[in-house]
Amino acid sequence: KKHQKKQKERKNEKGPSETEKDKTPVSLLPPPQPVATQKALPAPASAPIPVPASAPFHSSPAPSPADKPAKSKAELKAERRARQETDRAAKQPGSSSSGIKTKVPLSELNPVVKRLPEHVQVDDPAVVKRLAKKLERQQKGQNLGRNLERNQIPLRSDYGYKVSLFSHLHQYSRKAPLTQLLSIPSTVIHPSIVRLGLQYSQGIVAGSNARSVALLHAFKQVIRDYTTPPNEELSRDLVNKLKPYISFLNQCRPLSASMGNAIKYIKKEISNIPSQCKEEEAKTKLLTCIDRYIEEKIVLAAKAISKYAIEKISDGDVILVYGYSSLVNNILCEAFEKSRKFRVIVVDSRPRLEGREALRRLVQRGISCTYVLISALSYILPEVSKVFLGAHALLANGYVMSRVGTSQIALVARTYNVPVLVCCETYKFCERVQTDSFVSNELDDPDDLMVTRKGKTQLENWQDVSSLGLLNLVYDVTPPDFVDLVITDLGMIPCTSVPVVLRVKNLDQ
Amino acid sequence: MPGADKEADLTERIEAFLADLKRGGCGTGPIRGSGETARETTALLRKVTAQARWSSAGDLMEIIRKEGRRMTAAQPSETTVGNMVLRVLKIIREEYARSRGSSEETDQQESLHKLLTSGGLSDENFRQHYVHLKANVIEAINELLTELEGTTDNIAMQALEHIHSNEVIMTVGRSRTVEAFLKDAARKRKFHVIVAECAPFCQGHEMATNLSKASIETTVIADAAIFAVMSRVNKVIIGTQTVLANGGLRAVNGTHTVALAARHHSTPLIVCAPMFKLSPQFPNEEDTFHKFVSPHEVLPFTEGEILSKVNVHCPVFDYVPPELITLFISNIGGNAPSYIYRLMSELYHPEDHDL
């Protein structure tokens, strides 16, 4: 290839000096093209490389043929540069094909830029149109031969005035769930999925683990009721059947990172089913796979995490928890059963007030508890010896994505030198990276912020006032320097080791 | 007799004032703002000066001290009352010294030089009688009242020096001073305000509705989102209940979190506080610093089953150390927190600090 390239370049050298100017652009085109096709994967990195090679060619035909010796020197330099670049380019794909076993192939180190999910591009009208078309396409694929009068999976519309910093996110109202716009019975969407969507959007099923488990159970029901249509393969058709369900659930409430990982796992399992497998056998295999996933990744992981975490709880501790995390509650209950003497401070925040649920469960077990709101944090922290936090997801750059308010707790705890421990199962580890809480977040119903005190609701008519907006964030990201330790089912790791765990997981799969 | 009527009227007014103070400690803030409290206190003290029977400055100071002790005992967390009493005492000292003819201006501070050269305590017993002392004192108290009436406007006038256009400003809860400050700036500049609602009393809601009526772009956020949103904030402007002697603040709860988040993002923290909020107290008394209100605000009685088994706290104030504060804006201009001790020594006499 190198030899070919050199020949072509020499041809082009002679070309500009002999022929007219307008022929040169044509002759310049061939060299960039084969160079570009050589490098399939590291495309963004190498795209600019052919361009400088062609630029000197452009400049060289401009001066008159009288400056031949100077031209040829410039051309030689350009040719040398182009040769260096092709050498460099040839080396990169070459190293991946050399097949060193321990080294991860280049395609994994430089993955192609992922497409941005639709739910963070609400301000782009083209994306919204694309989503609507996708929904139509997905359900058309399900109803061959049946004509639908109207769109069965409607597009959910935003509600209320959105703060300008968040105009790229959806903001839905809880009073207008998507299920109201569906017909009964819905022919496109399985009823257990419809029920699940309603439970998500009303907040009946909330919490990362709960949502994933509910999703997996609903998918089990879908698989049980599924029959392969004739002339279709189960492995391909079932995946296509699941797509509109996932879009529907995404519209009811944006998918969490744990749900995303669970869906990826299911899709992989389905597509790995051999085509000669009988339908009944395939279905039982899938159901056992899902059961095993729940058992391993959630139930057993919780047990492993409790075992590690209990080592960190000593007698006389005052432990601070925030909101309701099923994992942290599990840990505290188990530690209490193992007769550790400690007391718990539950911090809660408006408008969700999830801490009350945690408080109820802890008090039922008999653990002595204190309850404050998050604004009283500076008052209560001097009493605290440890902070246990749950996580919604752990991002690849070490940031912890969790319920809004977690980063505040970590910040104030660090000021008072109180250790912060985050508990998270590995199935919540996510390959996304994020540095602030703005770009990718979820906006909850803004009406939740209203409160009636002494018979007066101050913000009752906030919609009528044009310059007033309410912001109800759901998640925020905590920087890794606020977190002292992450307890996972693989052990106790620092926050910055998350990409290592992800890599190990990917290699396993 | 007219004298007895006036006296009865005076005691009635004082009793009504004390009752208001006692009732106003329910957490949602006193019935009247601290500016009004200061003015009411000063007006009462002027009446006491005018009507009580006294012959020398020492007697007057004793009477004022007695009334002051009663008033501060009614609501210890309302420090403006005590501050005004101290101001009036200082006025009396100054007028006495002026009547005596000595130039008190140079003898204000307890400087090291003075301690070494004077040798022994100054034996001022304030026993001499001066004819015009009463009139002078009342005139000085009137000047103090005029100053108090103009504090909010003085602070609001400085708004344009601190706010540029297209800024994002964060504030916490409700402060009448900050409201006037922002409204004054909004007349000429366009900016965005984020208000943290400050649970459980949610006074931020009222602040947000007032600001949005003045056509300022306002957003209400929950307390939990303060750190999440802080990275996009350019300035934090807050009010406070008291400015302590070391330059720290006793402010509404949640302010310490805001201050820490602002320091983490290197955002300047500006406190708008008029001079009558400056108090000679220090924050080192753990037990007396905090004020608590009914935990019903935090965990309502509807959660009946667990209420008896759980400790619930509802503190009203937060301590903010002076290192986290960038600037104090008061009616006499802008100051750094490290200068507060000096201002305090100009306002109050050190011997009066313990009423």
Image (cartoon, coloured by chain):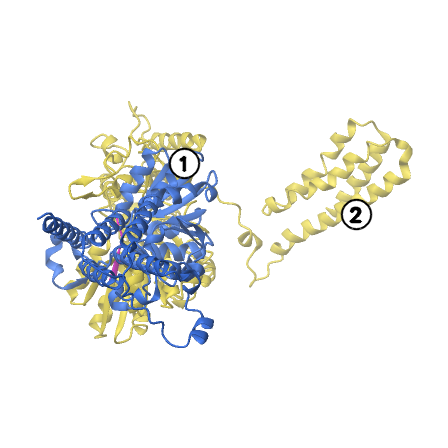
User: Which corner quadrant of the image does residue B83 belong to?
Assistant: bottom left
Residue, disc 2 = A80
Residue, disc 1 = B186
In magenta stretch: residue B122: no
Mark 2: give few (<14), some (14-19) or many (20+) Cα within 10 Å.
some
- Distance from disc 2 to disc 1, alpha carbons, whole Å, reads 63 Å
The chain under label 1 reads: B
- The amino acid at mark 2 is Arg
Residue A153, horizontal then vertical, whole percent = 30, 32
SS class, disc 2: helix
- The amino acid at mark 1 is Ala
Along the horizontal axis of the image, is B114 left or right of A221? right
SS class, disc 1: helix
A263 and A491: which is toward the camera: A491
Q: What range is drawn magenta here?
A: A346-350
The chain displayed yellow equals: A
Q: Are marks 2 and 1 on the same chain?
A: no
Residue B267, horizontal then vertical, whole percent = 45, 52
State the residue at coordinates (36%, 62%).
B245
Q: How would you classify the magenta stretch by its main secondary structure?
A: strand
Residue A275 in sight in this render: no
Q: Is residue B246 above or below residue A54?
A: below
Chain B on-screen colour: blue
Residue A74, horizontal then vertical, whole percent = 83, 42
Quarter of the image that includes the C terminus of chain B: bottom left
Along the horizontal axis of the image, is A102 left or right of B54? right
Residue A178, horizontal then vertical, whole percent = 27, 35
Residue B333: assigned label: none
